[in-house]
Amino acid sequence: MLAATKHVGLDIEAPGITKGPIEMPSLPKPLTLEEKKYMLAVERGDLAYCRRMIQRAHRRGSININCVDPLGRGALTLAIDGENLEMLEVLVVMGVRTKDALLHAINVEFVEAVELLLEYEELVHKEGEPYSWENVDWNISMFTPDITPLILAAHRNNYEILKILLDRGATLPMPHDIKCGCEECLRDSNEDSLRHSMSRVNEYRALASPSLIALSSNDPILTAFQLSWELRNLAFAEPECKTEYWELRRQCQKFAVDLLHQSRSSQELAIILNHDPESPSYEDGEHMKLARLELAINYKQKKFVAHPNIQQLLAALWYEGLPGFRRKPMVQKCLDVSQVALLFPFYCMLYMVAPNTATGKLMRKPFMKFLIHASSYLFFLLILILVSQHAEVQVTLLFGTETMKTALQEQLLKQRGNSPTFLEWVVVIYVLGFIWEETMEISREGMRCYLRNMWNFIDFTRNSLYVGTTLLRVAAYVQQCREISKDPATAYIPREQWDDFDPQLVAEGLFAAANVFSALKLVHLFSINPHLGPLQISLGRMVIDIVKFFFIYSLVLFAFACGLNQLLGYFADLERVRCYHLPGGIPDWENNGDACMKWRRFGNLFESSQSLFWASFGGVGIDSFELTGIKTYTRFWGLLMFGSYSVINVIVLLNLLIAMMSNSYAMITEHSDIEWKFARTRLWLSYFEESATLPPPFNIFPTPKHIMKLLGMRKEDKLRRMSTRHCSVNYLYQVRILVCWTNTLSIHHRDERKERQEKERDYRYTAVMRSLVWRYVSTMHRQAEDNPVTEDDINEVKTEVSAMKCQLLEVLGKNGMDISCADSKEIDDHGQEDAHVGATSHEGLPSGSCDRRRGAGPTQGATSGERGLSGKVPAYCQAGRHQLIRSQVGGGRARSMPGVSTSGQQV
């Protein structure tokens, strides 16, 4: 048995590891027979026997009242595990050292024991000295050094214990940023990187406690959002603890959803979702800005956004102005939508002329605004289809006059120097409207919010391609007109004789790519549909999988392309010579067409990469290796490399991609409703905002509304400048002085009104938050009471029955009853259970799994009365005796406990 501490001569020099000698832990000593009886009496709740043993120990020193069993459990720990408050009071008052008993009481959620031990700590603690739970051997302690009572209570998420600790002044330091370079963080990381990382995890696990957030935050929902986002960033910054951080993030998200679930009226929900510390409070009937909901979307609180309470409110706002639309038959809905889609130009022109009419006000409603914008975009796609199909040519051939057909034939022959057609001018006007729409969105929301929406990247790419197309068409028109002015015959050069990178050809390529992005925007518009929306979410997730797969795929492809190009490059060059043997370097497709095809397969690194890529889709066969002059050995190695590539990329990696996509689809299917509602809400919010009512291209035309607004702003600026000039120059005149005072008073009243609105806003929101927190705590308490009976509850009842038996025997003995038979049976029981209390190995370690420790069951209100204690008791216990021995210790005085947290920001 090693009782003394020994030093082992092993110095650690690696960075991030504790340097210095490693200490041998001080393991428990074997228990004597009397100590075994003492520990067993504590476990069974025999108050009288324990009291006599402790008194005898104070007089004679026969036993060590602070002894521990082979599992490291002392008398206080056994009493706490059995939730025996009376036994705990006796042990504390009679001088048993508490050590980390407070942490054990918090760990098993024994509220009365926590109150008792906190009051005892206030009595005995001296300023500047460590607390009792800090005076332990951390090598064998159950808890790590960074665990404080408040952190442990937050880990257990016990509302009562947390409130007790916070009322007594306990604080929790805010963790430093993971990239913090302060002296303290650098020192801790260099000394022990593992402990530094685990300490951060423990601190964030405490901060993520729903009960701690509810008790310490004035805005629990905002705190849960911010902490959830911070934990997300930590999961990416510290992948070693990613699982723990993601679990804590889900816990914060669930807490926000549980609070939202407690809302009971539309008014409470509106106050929550419209709360903005920078804006006035929301009043019934006002336009909902939904600032808190936008914040939830920015923090990716998908379950919060998809909650039925929020979705019901959003649906009511979405169909505002169209009463009964959702209850109409499907056929009637389609007819109404088709009517708006066909007549959208007339609606837009009417709004431009008279925006304040009934129809104009209806167009500002979210659903109508969506229909108008979607109809305009569908019309734009129709124009693109007509442009790509050369509709003007077809119409002229079908319905044009002979003169028009003759002019058309002349124009078709003259392929260079042509000006844009009418439909192409319509596309240009639409593009200007799109650019203006995106510009206004950036100015309204800011660049950061604009970049958070991935669909804005598609819009930006589409607009950029159209702008590039327009510029290249202008450059091509200028270049071709200059060439035609020098030689009119150049206007009739056919396309097959143009330069490969002619500006008009490049512009047509960009225009085709822009049309693809324009059509893809339909996917975003159809995300509002409950059937197509989840498919759009699945498509987006699969695109991410394809990007991940393509990275590995490209590495393998590049590796084999390098090898095949080096191996077959010489023979591919021979094929190229056969192809271009005609004078002037013209390819001989008629006689050597096969050589013209084969030399491109492995002529250079780029061509080799292309060949291997299309080989994945069956575009390249083994006949491509039949090159001029190739040797059998070289051909064999080429085919072997090509076969290896096919096995790796075509069979293995492509099947891996299929598995990844299947897994993503399965994950999306499990959460399809939440993912779809979150995406739909983002789309809805874009139409709830006070954005442009008119869609492109109508938004670029000036309207009377904009003209009047512009004139009103100029008039207001002019009056403000006149008022300022009068106040600063002509202040000697009485009228001007009155004007100045009037302006000053109006500013003062405006400030007072603003301050009053801020107080009202904070009061209403705080009142709603307190109601939600109270309902949440009550619900959690009721759910805890409804838990079924567990083994811990049975063990607790057994302990109470045993303690009651011992107390009954004591009372009967004091009243002259003969209890010798019961005493002898007790002694026999003690002897039979000695093996459990004191079984040890030769080195003092537990010899077997004989742990009978009781877990933490639901908190039970134990009762105890004051009992007279006799014998030798320490002086400090005598002084605080009457304060400690009570059934409810919550009336003790509160004291700030710097030992819980010596520094840092308070929660």
Image (cartoon, grey):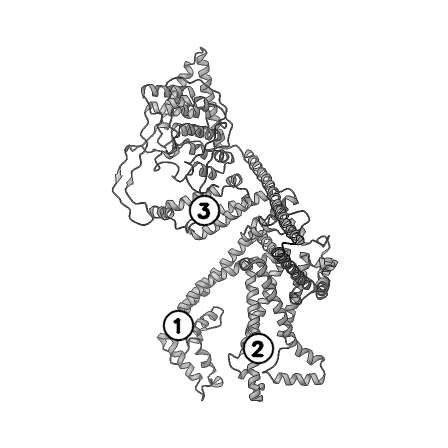
Q: Which residue is mark 3?
A: 244
Given the image, on which type of amino acid does mark 2 rest? Val
Given the image, on which type of amino acid does mark 1 rest? Leu
Residue 275 left/right relative to 63: right
Secondary structure beneath disc 3?
Answer: helix
Sequence-wise first label, 3 or 1: 3
Secondary structure beneath disc 1?
Answer: helix
On the question of residue 448 being in view, the answer is: yes
Give the CA separation, mark 2 to mark 3: 58 Å
Give the CA separation, mark 3 to mark 1: 47 Å
Give the CA separation, mark 1 to mark 2: 44 Å
Q: Which residue is mark 2?
A: 474
Q: Which residue is pictured at 65% across the width and 72% down the height?
A: 426
Sequence-wise first label, 2 or 3: 3
Which image quadrant is residue 462 in?
bottom right
In the image, residue 132 sits, relative to residue 540, either above or below, namely above
In the image, residue 560 sits, relative to residue 35, either above or below, namely below
- Foreground residue among 269 and 544: 269
Q: Which residue is pictured at 47% across the width and 82% down the height?
A: 593
Mark in the foreground, 3 or 1: 3
Residue 695 left/right relative to 809: right
Q: Which residue is mark 1?
A: 564
Given the image, on which type of amino acid does mark 3 rest? Glu
Secondary structure beneath disc 2?
Answer: helix
Residue 8, given in percent of the width and then of the height, sits at: 26, 40
Number of residues whose C-alpha sits closer than 10 Å to that of mark 2, classed few (under 14), some (14–19) or many (20 or more): some
Sequence-wise first label, 1 or 2: 2
- Foreground residue among 806 and 294: 294
Residue 172, given in percent of the width and then of the height, sits at: 45, 40
Residue 294, given in percent of the width and then of the height, sits at: 58, 52
In the image, residue 171 sits, relative to residue 444, either above or below, namely above
